[in-house]
Image (cartoon, rainbow, N blue to C red):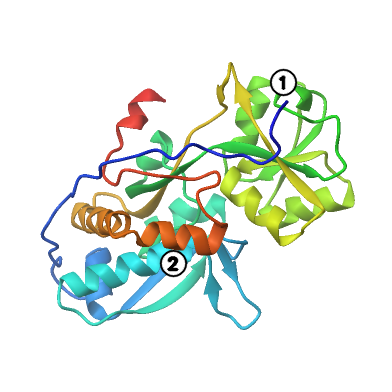
Amino acid sequence: MKRNIFRLAAISSTVALAGATLAACGDSAGGGDGMLAAIESGDVTIGTKYDQPGLGLRNPDGSMAGLDVDVAEYVVNHIAEENGWEAPTVTWRETPSAQRETLIQNGEVDLIAATYSINKGRSESVNFGGPYLITHQALLVREEESEITDLESLDGKILCSVTGSTPAQKVKDALPGVQLQEYDTYSSCVEALRQGNIDAMTTDATILLGYSAQAPGQFKVIEMEQDGEPFTNEYYGIGLAKDDQEGTDAINAALTDLHESGEFDRLLQSNLGGDEAVSPGEPGDLSFLDEN
């Protein structure tokens, strides 16, 4: 019998330190000199999601909360400390999935941590630090739903995801009979599911668990497998300007410390309730791109 809540076995990883020495890159921020210059200047703009409980959420008072938020803050503060700079002031910027690469390329953000799965297409436009976690694609359905129990049972159903993300299209490719509905935000998908306008929502299990926890008794998370294996592997990274190698190395060094210090486990517990649907990534190891 399929499990409703998606659990992953912990993946033990030995994280290699990339770039032990963090160097500033030239002039201060504002001159287009990369992420390190922005941090050194004392003002850094970080992109994240505003509507994903447990990952990136803007509270009514304007404060930010979630695992991606905490990871990004840890990274910029670690880089500042390692270089002897003051901790920077962070300006948060909402970064919907479809706009992430554009915002980085236009210099509107210095880095993005926003459930940002690393893939070949995106890596042609931006650099990635990480991955800092691994998750898999899953389904969110209403609690009383009995017909949808796995990937195959989606055939002929109305499936929702977000414009600019890849999960729904992957399901569509596997099951051409799926009726795909796309919205600008995941919260819009959740509301459509609540109202009965769609049958299921798909994206990473981390995101879906956050929405399910936010509305106890309304939704449940269904795992997705194909040939006995997880339907997808999603590797979350931190995006920054293409070819900013100094910034990339600095992020990987900070993420390495995040894992080795045990702080990642603490942040995971406080934001998502432990290691459910999440395993630690190996910062700097992008070899999985050759497997896709």
Q: Nearer the viewer, residue 118 or 219?
A: 219
Height in image: 148 above or below 274?
A: above
| Residue corresponding to mark 2 | 70
Q: Which residue is painted at 65% across and 35% down in the image?
A: 168
Q: Which residue is painted at 38% across and 53% down in the image?
A: 239
**Residue 222 quadrant:** top right
Where does residue 246 sit, x and y in percent of width and height? 18, 56
Q: Is mark 2 on a helix, strand or loop?
A: helix
> Which three-letter amino acid code belongs to the residue tagged 2?
Asp
| Residue corresponding to mark 1 | 176
> Which three-letter amino acid code belongs to the residue tagged 1?
Pro
Q: Quick check: 118 left or right of 219?
A: left
Where does residue 135 sit, x and y in percent of width and height? 50, 41
Residue sitting farthest toward the top: 227
Height in image: 207 above or below 10?
A: below
Where does residue 164 sit, x and y in percent of width and height? 58, 45
**Residue 65 quadrant:** bottom right
Asked whether the viewer can see residue 106, the reply is no
Q: Nearer the viewer, residue 87 or 178?
A: 87
Q: Quick check: 139 left or right of 288?
A: right
Q: Is mark 1 on a helix, strand or loop?
A: loop
Q: Which of 92 and 206 is in front in this view?
A: 206
